[in-house]
Image (cartoon, rainbow, N blue to C red):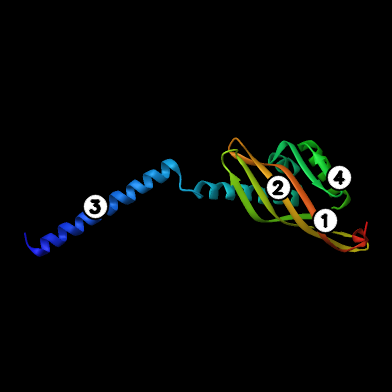
Amino acid sequence: MSDDQSRVKARDRRCQFAFVAIALSMFISSCAGIPGTSRGSEKMAVSGGRHMMDEAFKSRDLAALGQRVSEHVSVTGPVFRTVGRDDLKSALLHLTAHRPDVEWTHLPDDIRVYAGWQVAFESGSWRETWRVPDGATEITGRYAALWVKSGTDWVLDAEVFVPLSCTGSDYCRPQ
């Protein structure tokens, strides 16, 4: 066998080994999951759920918003406390009736998933704005949320939001 033939055979063996190693790695990954891969897609699902909730609130589609929360959801802030899907929808209906232009936006900065219990933690900042006769109001702060997996969907189970600033109208006067 010539040197050229030996080099070709050695290269072919290396290619076969690399192919087998890659194929085996892909097989093991698909069976066991690469750490963080499934969590990454679960994080995206939670983030997508949050976005859908914000969009539903923006369009005043409380039925769609209600589909993204658990039956016993709890949402709590200094002047806003609800327990249960119907209570939340009722409170949001009241809020939007009194502040027709109210906007409520979440800006998640951390989502962590614990697949073992099918729960996720989300935290970030939130912003609420509306106009009243004496001017515009803007409240900003931080929130923390508990999401649970229900079937194939992630639903909000609890949220606590804390205002850290209020600017604008008389609403912001110290309490």
What residue sits right under mark 3 in the picture? 16
Which tag is nearer the camera, tag 4 or tag 2? 2
Q: Which residue is mark 1?
A: 101
Tell me, yes or no, whether the two marked residues, 4 and 2, touch with CB atoms within 8 Å: no
Please rate how many residues cluster around mark 3, counting C-alpha atoms within 10 Å: few if below 14, some from 14 to 19, many from 20.
few
For the residue marked with disc 2, what is the amino acid? Ala
Of discs 4 and 1, which sits in the foreground?
Answer: 4
Residue 148, how many percent across, how many down?
A: 65, 40
Residue ID for mark 4:
94
| Secondary structure under the numbered disc 1 in the rendered image | loop
**Front in this rendered view, residue 103 or 73:** 73
Q: Is residue 42 left or right of residue 130?
A: left
Precedes in sequence: disc 3 or disc 4: 3
Say which amino acid is labelled 3: Gln
According to the picture, the residue beneath numbered tag 2 turns out to be 145
> How far separated are the C-alphas under marks 4 and 2?
22 Å
